Image (cartoon, coloured by chain):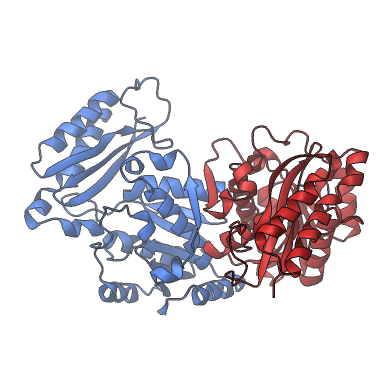
Chain colours: A blue, B red
Amino acid sequence: MDIFSEIDQMQRQASILTRAGKTIGFVPTMGYLHEGHLSLIRRSRAENDITVVSIFVNPIQFGPNEDLDRYPRDIEGDIEKLRALNVDVLFLPSMKEMYPEGYKTYVIVEGLSDKLCGAFRPGHFRGVTTVVLKLFNIVKPTRAYFGLKDFQQTLIIKQMVRDLNMDIQIIACPTIREHDGLAMSSRNKYLTEEERQGAGIVYRALLNAAEKLKEGAGFKEAASTLRETLKSSPHIREIQYASVYDPETLDDLTDVDVKIYKKPEVVLAVALYYGNARLIDNLLVKLR
Amino acid sequence: MDIFSEIDQMQRQASILTRAGKTIGFVPTMGYLHEGHLSLIRRSRAENDITVVSIFVNPIQFGPNEDLDRYPRDIEGDIEKLRALNVDVLFLPSMKEMYPEGYKTYVIVEGLSDKLCGAFRPGHFRGVTTVVLKLFNIVKPTRAYFGLKDFQQTLIIKQMVRDLNMDIQIIACPTIREHDGLAMSSRNKYLTEEERQGAGIVYRALLNAAEKLKEGAGFKEAASTLRETLKSSPHIREIQYASVYDPETLDDLTDVDVKIYKKPEVVLAVALYYGNARLIDNLLVKLR
């Protein structure tokens, strides 16, 4: 596995591969790799000639009071996992390489970036779209892989790629879960053992609400079920959002009559503090 | 000459050329081509295997009270000029092709975009950087050519390309002038015959101020000379800005002591209404 820490090296290699007609699959990550990341990498390996993984904890997507400094890191362990999966290239740039002095350019996706997580993390998605665009220009992928656990992020990146006419296929992959349903996330490390044991409640709450919808309940009732289930856990400190949303616009559907809603699917989505960990999860539900 | 009006056609062609190892030179324009544009095209022809020119009057870089509707157009004449220069591809997209319904993504270069023209045309440079990024993704150029008449635009695009790690060389080309020094611009069409005859004053004002600097005058005195010369014309309705600027930061240098200023160059820049035409011009001046 090649490990490139300089943008020039990575970009030159990507150009050579592109000219040789090779397809490049790309999995951008912030490291501390778990089974969710690995599932994306396996899919990229299966679908492309070359697989590039990046590890970069992107400072500009963290707010001033967020967990940038304590975000979990394990480069040695990550490299071992990537080697075991026969990843071709690890791109591992420094902060200074990505954002040199005098850096000034940002990419924004209006509307979608202000909803759900965006309402609680101002500037977060601007940081995400900016770094993803930079990484795409450096790695020059044919296909890029994102996990549906970050449903809003994937939606925003698809919109960016479409709007900016980037010649890249965005592939959204299913959320990988622990045995009790907890969505895999590097931030699960913040949970104490006791908290970890109870954290399956988030997925159970999504399943309960989905069940309501399948039984023909309205969006308001499903949203109530979601919130009520979550509130039964003593560890949940703050529910930032938990409702039924339009999976294309991210509009809250609570006050929409299910009979008027014409799309085939909704997404149940939550963000909350479970102990010290901010957890997000979601579930796409087919209505018909 | 191929004429593509669909993004897919253009992008597919660009991919084929890139894979075949061809270099692509790109000249983005808003049409109504004049000798300034043609000089960029000739340079691109000389330096690249393939030259692509785009014509697209980009609505999102015009403010609500600006001249989008009356911006001069002459597609037939433009095509003739491009054929005469043996341009390989004309990319001629529609508004709907570039900004389909639900379009949401914008690129901003902070700081530089709010100065000079940006202060008088809010959102203008956001529109420019967004469309240029889109065009770059569609045309996939090796080199792109911009005229120095639009000094601030060229500076901002260079910054964007550097910040976003775009693998494209930006080439800034000298301003082409009429015999009396008036910088070539599609907007010169707005001048009446009488106004046109006097419009050489803009360049003369720049030359007078440059002369002052060469004689050792301070920035304040040079800026005064610039403004005083301009004010001698009866057709100048409004001077939006006219001063001495740092060519990297675009900071106004009027109150800076020339002895303290360490860079080798300054730029004299003006924007004004000459009759009904908003004209801009500038001159780089070597200090030492």
Residue A26 lies, with reference to residue B58, above or below; the image says below
Q: Name the quarter where the C terminus of chain A is drawn.
A: top left
The N terminus of chain A lies in quadrant: bottom left
Q: Depth check: give the residue in front, B30 or B102.
A: B30
Q: Residue furthest bottom?
A: A2
Is residue B13 something one can see in this rendering? no
- Residue drawn 37% across and 65% down? A41
Q: Is residue A244 left or right of residue B193?
A: left
Residue B240 seen from this side? yes
- Residue A174, how many percent across, how many down? 33, 51
Residue appearing at x 46%, y 63% in the figure: A47
Quadrant of residue B268 within the rendered picture: bottom right
B215 to the left or right of A6: right
Above/below status of A256 relative to A251: above
> Looking at the image, is A205 positioned above or below residue B43?
above
Is A215 positioned to the left or the right of A169 in the image?
Answer: left
Residue occupying the point 19% across, 56% down: A188
Q: How many numbered badges does the structure rendering display? A: 0
The image shows residue A244 at horizontal and vertical percentages of 30, 32
Spot occupied by residue A61 in the image (x, y as percentages of width and height)? 37, 55
User: How far across and down, in percent of the image, does residue A18 sit?
Assistant: 58, 70
